Image (spheres, rainbow, N blue to C red):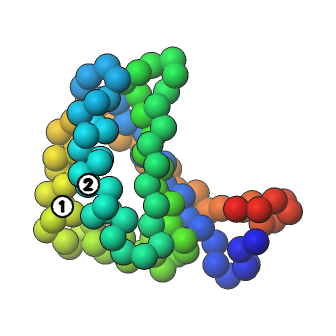
Amino acid sequence: MQSATKKKIVLHLRITTREIGGETLRSFLRMAVPFYQAPQGIAVRLLRNRADPTRFVEVIEYDDEEAFEHDAARVRSDPEMRRLLERWRSLLVGGIEVEVFEDETDRIGGED
């Protein structure tokens, strides 16, 4: 279990792709995810909506607040990250819904 001082931060990015099935998005992520995950403590997952094949949730899991803050700084200042995010946005239509969660699993007696 996680200690009380070290909580995972989980980011959900709810997005809609320009194409049905999202193959262009998956292709982009195959290239970009190694860069996204390069700092320690970051994992990226992709979920597809079964009812709407243009809707996805990108899940970015941070081991702790420090990893989350470090990545936020990288988004603001790293030219390569900004270039990748601009390309990612070009694959999408509409807005991006962002939700940030703190993992509370340890408080219900479950495991990570």
Q: Secondary structure at mark 1?
A: helix
Query: Going from the N terminus, do you reach mark 1 or mark 2 first?
Result: 2
Snapshot quadrant of residue 15: top left
Residue 82 image label: 1
Marks counted in the figure total 2
Determine the residue positioned at 48% across, 38% down: 47
Q: Secondary structure at mark 2?
A: helix
Q: Is residue 88 above or below residue 84?
A: above
Left or right: 22 with respect to 3? left
Residue 9 image label: none
Neighbours of disc 2 within 10 Å: few (<14), some (14-19), many (20+)? some
Residue at image mark 2: 32
One can see residue 25 in this view: yes
Neighbours of disc 1 within 10 Å: few (<14), some (14-19), many (20+)? some
Locate residue 1, reporting x and y percent.
76, 71
Determine the residue positioned at 31% across, 38% down: 26
Q: Is residue 78 above or below residue 98?
A: below
Amino acid beneath label 1 = Arg
One can see residue 92 in this view: no
Left or right: 31 with respect to 102? left
Determine the residue positioned at 24% across, 25% down: 18
Q: Is residue 63 above or below residue 47?
A: below
Left or right: 11 with respect to 82? right
Q: Nearer the viewer, mark 1 or mark 2?
A: 2
Determine the residue positioned at 49% across, 27% down: 49
Where the C terminus falls, by quadrant? bottom right
